[in-house]
Image (cartoon, helix red, strand yellow):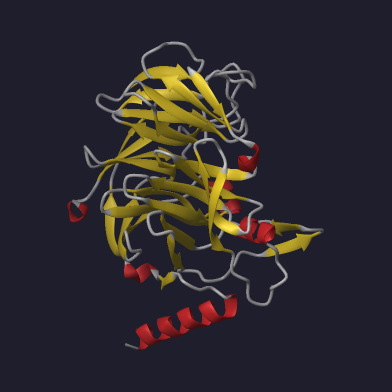
Amino acid sequence: MNRLILVLILLFSISCEQGIENNDYIIIQKEDFTLIPLQSNKYFFEEIINPSNIGLVDDKILISEAWRVPEEHPRIHIVNSTDWTYDKPKGKHGEGPLDLIDASLFYKGKSDDTFWAYSMNGRKLLEYSMSETTLLGKSEWKMTEPMMDLWFFTQATDSSFLGISRVSENRILEFDKEGNRIGGYGNWEKVKDRPELNYTQLAVLNGGFFKGNAEEGLFIRGGLFRDRLEIFNNRYKSFIIIDGPDLELPAFEIIGNELYLGPDPHFRYRDAVVTKNYIFALYGGVSHSDFNKTSVMATQIWVFDHMGQPLYNLKLDRSLINFVINEETNEIYGLTTDEDPGIAVYTIPKELL
């Protein structure tokens, strides 16, 4: 009872001090989760040098390479999850038509044989064939001028995209299929004792990833440097914000008009997946210097229901940088951060089935 009263007081205090309205707020502690240890099998592929992002389209695993690989090396790899064999490479590096510089996110294509890759640095989407052997894309869609300041964006409906920007007064923006802005949701709240911070600085302070599930209408904005997870319901245009366990903001300073984080920030949320019944969030909590020493990034997946209530802490035997979930086989596929990075495969525990 005392803890409940304290949480209610904190919620009221945060709402009043920061001027947040019309949102649901949850403050969590690690003790709110039921711990479940998980063991994995790991698959290594010599064709993949420095994996950075993972996607899943049907039974095909899509893996992108980080920028620290030779330019002649393909930027995308396809792996068969049915028998754990290497399928083929994709993604010719370059800045020309049907080339790409990087691949930050993957989406299912127009047909069963295609997928889309989002090139953040190239500011475009490229469509690739699963079956053809060419490294080049089949088609591409270049981001429009109103979308140029987006960090991440994803398909929200058959006729719209959602994304997060570094220069907007809104936490989430909506665009139609032609790239025209049609909506903005969630104003930035003021930071206690630093009311002068503008929305560009607040966007950096709250920087992170943006992913979701269009079928469920739920999208996640995860804090890379602060303990905040935002659940956006696209059907109702509403937010649930989850803060904690650490309620402190990361150290920062303002130089000129730019916000810079401290010299050794802690990595918080690294990735998230929305399934039919749950939200899975990969959590780190390690400093940049510790990661450089140990290569351990994140060894916990926190599981929430769709309303943001904490349920389980899946304690992993390996460190991951991001992951996907195969709901057909009830498996988690994660990119490891060890010396020989590969794909760690976990079976989802029976408590979540």
Q: Quadrant of residue 215?
A: top left
Q: Is residue 249 above or below residue 172?
A: below
Relative depth, front residue between 273 and 319: 273
From the top left corner, tell me how far across and down residue 64 is, in percent: 49, 30
Relative depth, front residue between 202 and 246: 202
Q: Is residue 351 visible?
A: yes
Q: Is residue 9 above or below residue 293?
A: below
Which quadrant does the N terminus fall into?
bottom left
From the top left corner, tell me how far across and down residue 164 is, in percent: 55, 50
Residue at 82% over, 58% down: 256
Residue at 55% over, 81% down: 16
Relative depth, front residue between 194 and 318: 194
From the top left corner, tell me how far across and down residue 81 is, in percent: 29, 28
Residue lying at the far right of the rendered structure: 256
Q: Is residue 179 above or below residue 203?
A: above
Q: Quadrant of residue 40?
A: top left
Residue at 54% over, 48% down: 182
Q: Is residue 300 visible?
A: no
From the top left corner, tell me how far across and down residue 36 is, in percent: 27, 57
Residue lying at the far top of the rendered structure: 133
